[in-house]
Amino acid sequence: MSGEPRIGVYICHCGVNIAGSVNIKEVVEYVKNLPNVVEVRDYIFMCSAPGQEIIKEGIKKCGLNRVVVAACSPTMHEHTFRNVLAEAGLNPYLLEMVNIREQCSWVHSDNRQAATTKAKLLIKMAVAKASLLEPLKEITFKVNKNVLIIGGGVAGLSSARDLARKGFNVYLIEKKPVIGGNVARLGRLAHVELKGIDIVKELLHQVVDNPNIHILTNTELVSVGGSVGDFKVKLVKNPRYVNENCNLCSECVKVCPVEVSNEYEFGLSKRKAIYLPYRNAYPPIYVIDSENCTRCFECVKVCPTQAINLAEKPEEIEVEVGAIVIAAGHEPYEPLIGEFGYGVSSRVITLFQLERILDEDGPTKGRLEVNGVQPKDIVFITCVGSLNTTPNAYPYCSRMCCSSTIKNALIIKEKVPNANIYILHKDIRTYSRGDEQLYLKAGESLIRFARYREAPNVIVNPDESINVRFFEETIQEPVSIPADLVVLSVGMKPPRDIDKVRTIVKVGCGPEGFLREAHLKLRPVEAATDGVYLAGTVTGPKNIIESIEAGGAAASKVSTLLTREEVRIEPLIAVVNDEKCSGCLICVGICPYNAIKLRIQGDARVAEVDPALCKGCGACVASCPTGAMQQFGFKDNQLESQVLAAFTE
Amino acid sequence: MSQDFEPRIVVFACNWCSYAALDLAGTSRMKYPPNFLVIRVMCSGRVDPQFILEAFRRGADGVLVAGCHPGDCHYIEGNIKALRRMTLLKKVLKEFGIEEERFRLEWISASEADKFVRVANEMLEEIKRLGPLRIEEAYQHG
Amino acid sequence: MEALSKPVLVIGGGIAGIQASLDLADQGVHVYLVERSPSIGGKMARLDKTFPTLDCASCILTPKMVSVARHPNIELLTYSEVVEVRGSAGDFHVKVLKKPRYVDEDKCIGCGECISKCPSKVPDEFNLGMSNRKAIYFLFPQAVPLKATIDREHCLYFTKGICRVCERFCPTKAINFEQKPETLELNVASIIIATGYELMDPGLAPTYGYGRYLNVYTSLEFERLVSSTGPTGGEIMRRSDKKHPRSIAFIQCVCSRDVKINPNCSAFCCMASVKHAILAKEHLPEVDCTIFYMDLRAFGKGYQEFYNRAMREFGVRFIKAKPAKIEEDPETRDLIVTYEDTFEGIKKSMKFEMVVLAVGVKPVYPEALPLTVGEDGYIRLRNPYLEPISTTIDGVYVVGVAAGAKDIPDSVIQAGSAAIKASIIAGGVKA
C-alpha cells in the first residue's frame, strides 16, 4: 500500500441500538475533520446488503485505501466487513472496527452526551490506527481429513456416524471402558417402544462396521498441539487388562474375591473388580478396575481364552486431525447426603436409579422394588439440583427432567396400576414435541401434580416411613404426603473432568462449567476456537433427541471445514525485523508454542518466527528489547497511535 | 479538587476474556462510567509497559490492563507474563510519583461483566479522589 | 470450492432454511433455496431482539442472509413455490414455479426510486398490516435479494390499466409488466423442508376479543411494535389513541396447550413474552408488565436466568392463571382481564391499557410433497429418536418449526443435522 492513507469511516445506527444513545449527526461532523478521512457515511444497518454496498461504493468512488466501521463488536461483524473490503478489491486487513454498541451505546444509554463523546474518541483512535494499517496476506494450511471426537455418548456417536458416512476418518475416544454414555442406561423411552440401550445399539450398529471409524475406549486426551485443520493430538489408552478374546463366559467374575458398588447401576447393585458395566455394554469385553483389583490372579487362572493380562501398560497414541468435536456429555446431579433424605433412607432414590429399577435389564429385572418390597405411595420431586431449589443446586433448568419424570410415572402406573403417584414440581416444562400429550396422559392416568416453591421437606420417620411436607402453591396450604418411595428428579451438571479437557483444547465455559458456544443463537455447535466443535449436553442440558441432532449439526460443521483443501488463518502473527534484531533470543524463551527459532544470517544470529506455529499472542513483541519483533495488526506504532489519539485534542 | 473532573482511563483488554466481558456488559445492558477507552489486544501478554508509560505521559489519568484468569489464558500463560511485567512497572510508576491507584491489572473472564463494572467504578472513584495526574511533575520526579 | 455432487433442494428461507443451505453450500454441495415470499429471512427477520442475550435479530441474521445471496453454491429462488415433486432419494425431479415480480431481477439495483413514486398504498404484511407499503415494494429494507416486487392485486396498472409511474422512474428499466410465471425443472438428490409456521388464528379464542378490541395485539405484532424498523419506529403505542400504555398484560398459551383448539406447546412463546416484557420496560421504564402463564417454560440455556432477571431486575409480575376473558372499556379502550386467582380460588379482574396474546403456532407444509401428518398436526417422522429429522419419504428431511415448535438455536442445530445427511446423499452415499 503506497501513498497517503485515504480513510472512509462508516457509522452504523444499528436501528436505534446505537442511534438511540449516540448523536450520529454530531459524530459524523466530528469525524469529517479527522486526519486522512476522506469519506464519512452513516446508515441504519451497515451490515445489511445495502449497507455493505455503501462501503463498496465508497472504496471505489473515493479511492479509499483504509476503512473504519463504527458499529457493533468486532467479534460480531469484523468478518463480514473484511469480506466487503475483499469484494471491493481492498486487502481485508485494511479494516479497523470501532465498537460503539456493546462498549458504548448500550452501556451509556443513560447519558447521550457522554456516549456521543466516547463514540467520537473511539473512532478517532481507530482512525489513527487505521492510518498505519498494512495489507496482510492470509496464511493457508492443508486440511487434515481426520477428526477426533471426544466422548462416546449419543451425541458423539451421532457425529461419528455422519462424518464416517461422509467419508472422513473418525477417532472416537471414550474415557470409560464402555460406549453409550448416560443414554445406554435409560429404560424405556417416551413415545416409542425403545430403550436407551436400543438407541445406542442402533447407532453403534451404524458405526462399528464402518472402516472409517476407530473407537478407542478407556482413552483420554493428553495434549493438543497445532491448530485448525492440523491438530496434533496425544492420547493415552489406559489398560483394560482384558482383550478381544474374552467370550463373556463370566468364569472370572465367579472367582474374583473383590466386591464393590457398581457405579454403572448408580450403586443399586454390586460388581466385582473384573466386570461388565451392565448387560449389553459395548464393547462386550470384561474390564478390570485396577483401583480395586488385588492382583490375586484368580481370574487369569480360570480364563479359558487367556484374555486377561494384568501386566498391560498404558499406551500412548498420537493422531493428527483437522477438527475436534467435544461431546463429553454431562453427569447427573448427585444430591448431597441428607438433601431430601437422600442417603438417609434407601427409599429415597434419584430418577436415574429409578430408570435402572424399571429397566428389564436392570438390577431388579424391571420389577419396581425397593429393599425387596413394592412401593405404592410414590412421590416425585422435580428440580432437584436445578432452579436454585436448594443452596447446593444450580440456577438453570435441565429441560429433560419434567418429561422424563412423567414418562417414568406413567411406566409405574402400567406396572403397578394402583400406585398413588404425586409429582411435586415448580412448573411442568414439557415443551418438546409430543411431551405435552404425555403430560395430558399423566393427568388422565390420575397422576397427581402439586406445586411447590420452597424445597419440600422429606421426613424419614424412625420406623422408616416417609412423609413429604411442603407448601402447596395452588391451594395455598401446607401438605404432608406419606410415601414409601421418593424419587428425586435430578438435573444435569457438567462432567467432572471437563475443565481438564477444555483447558487442553482451549474452550471457554460459562459460570456453571458448561462449555461456551461461539454464539448462543446462531453458532450453537461451534467453539470460539477455530476447528473445535461442541455436541450434546457438554454445552448445557438437552434431551436425547436434541443431543443426537447436535451431534449431526457438529458433524455438518466439521464437514464444512474438512471438505476444503486448505484453511486460511488470520495473519495476525509475529514477525521479525532482521536488521533490528540483536539476536538476544529473549523471545525464544517467552514463546509458549516454540514458534521462534534461531537463524544464522551472515555472521549474525537473528530470531525467526514459524508462521505455522505462531498463534499471535504478541508476548514476544512485548518482551523484545529492540523493537525488532512486531505483531501484524498490533504493531507498537499502531497501538501507540491509539493511545496518542485518546489524548491529543 | 474540581467537581467536574472527568478522568480519562485507557483499558488494554485481551480479546478472549476481558474484551468479551466488556461486550457482555453491553449485551446485558449494564451501566458503567463512560471514562474508559478500550484498546483491544489479543493477549494481556502483548501489553508493553511502554504503552502504559506513554499513556500516562500523554494525559491518561489511569490505565487498566485486563486479561484472562491465571490458567485460562488462550495462549497458555500470556497473562502470567503480563503479571510479571506489570509488577515491575508498578515499581517504576511509583518512582515517577504516579499513585498506584492509577494503574491496575485485573483478571476478568468472559462471563465477568459485573466484575469489570465493579473495577471500573472503583477505579473511577479513586482517581477522581486523586484528581488529574500532573504528569510533568511526575516525570520530573523520575 | 467446487460442487462435485448432485444438488439439494431447501424449501423455506427462514433461519432453518438459511442455515441448512449455508452448511450444504460450505460442504461443496449445490443448493436451490426456494422461498415463497420476495425475500428470505422468515420470522426471525421480523424479530426485534432475541432472548436471552437480547442480541438484535437483524444484526445476527442479515449477515447470514447476505452470505446466502453471495454464496457461489447457492441458487436463491425467491417469490417461488415448489409445485411438483417426483422421484426418490438421490434422484428427485422438482418443478418450481417462479412467480412474476414484474421487475427484472438482473436489472433492479434496489434503489427504491419506484417505491417512493408509487401512488398505491397497501397494508404492509411484514408489519402485519400495522403500516402501509406501496404496491411495488421491498418486503423489508434489508430484504435479500433487494429487488422490488409488484403486488399485482394492488397495482393500479394491473387493476385499472393506468399509472406505470414506476416504469417511468426506474433508472435501469427493470420494470416489466409483461413478465410471466416461469417453471423451472430441478433434479436434486435430497430435499430439506424448512417451511416454518404461521400463527394460529387468534379468533379461535373469541373471549380474548382479538380483532374486536383495538388494543389487543398478537405477540408477533408486538414484536414489530417494539422494533426500531417497525411501524412506529420502536414506539410502543396503542392502536386506539397512539398513547404509550401504562400497563401491559401478556397472556400465554393462546390457542396452544388447549385440547379443544391445539394441544401442542409452542415452546418459544414463554420466553418471547418474558423478552417482550423486558423490552417494554426498557422502552417505557414506568410501564407495568404482567405475564399470565400456565407453566413458565424457561428451559433453554440462560432462559431461567433471563426469567429471574425479568422478575427481580425489571419487576415484571407473573401470575399463574389462564384468563377466562377480556372485556373492553368502550370509553377508554382499556382492557379488563378476568382470571381465576389460583392462590385465593376466586375470580379477579385487572385493568390493562394493552394486552398481548402469545398465540400458538401451526406448521406450514408444501403441498407438492405427499407427506403424512401425525395426530399432532406435524409431519410424521421415521423414528423420533434415531432419525428425528427424517420424514417417511427417504431423502426428505424436515427441520425448524415445521418439525415441531422450537426456538432459534434448536432450529439452527436441526438445520445442520439435516445438511450433513442431505450432503451424504448428494455425494452418492446412502444415509
Image (cartoon, coloured by chain):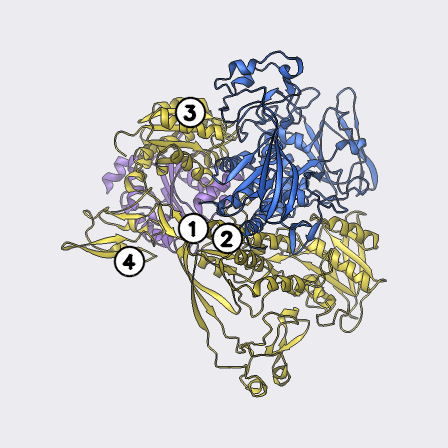
Chain colours: A yellow, B purple, C blue
Q: CA distance from mark 1 to mark 4?
A: 21 Å
Estimate how packed mark 1 is, as few (under 14), some (14 to 19) or many (20 or more) residues with alpha carbons within 10 Å: many
Residue type, label 1: Cys
Q: What number is the disc on residue A533?
A: 2
Whether callout 3 and callout 1 share a subunit is answered: no
Q: Name the residue carrying label 3.
A: A41
Q: What number is the disc on residue A589?
A: 4
Chain letter for mark 2, please.
A
Q: Nearer the N terminus, badge 2 or badge 3?
A: 3
Mark 1 touching mark 2, by CB under 8 A? no
Which of these two is toward me, A596 or B122? Answer: A596
Displayed quadrant of residue A151: bottom right
Estimate how packed mark 2 is, as few (under 14), some (14 to 19) or many (20 or more) residues with alpha carbons within 10 Å: many
Residue A378: give x, y in percent of width and height: 79, 62
Displayed quadrant of residue C349: top right
Residue C249: give x, y in percent of width and height: 71, 33
Q: Nearer the viewer, mark 3 or mark 1?
A: 3
Q: Is residue C181 visible?
A: yes
Quarter holding the N terminus of chain A is top left
Q: CA distance from mark 4 to mark 3?
A: 47 Å
Q: Nearer the viewer, mark 1 or mark 4?
A: 4
The kind of secondary structure element at disc 1 is: loop
Q: CA distance from mark 3 to mark 1?
A: 36 Å
Residue type, label 4: Gly
Q: Name the residue carrying label 1.
A: B68
Q: Nearer the viewer, mark 1 or mark 2?
A: 2
Residue type, label 2: Tyr
Chain letter for mark 1, please.
B
Q: What number is the disc on residue C281?
A: none
User: Is residue A268 shown above or below A618?
Assistant: below
Q: Residue extending furthest left?
A: A603
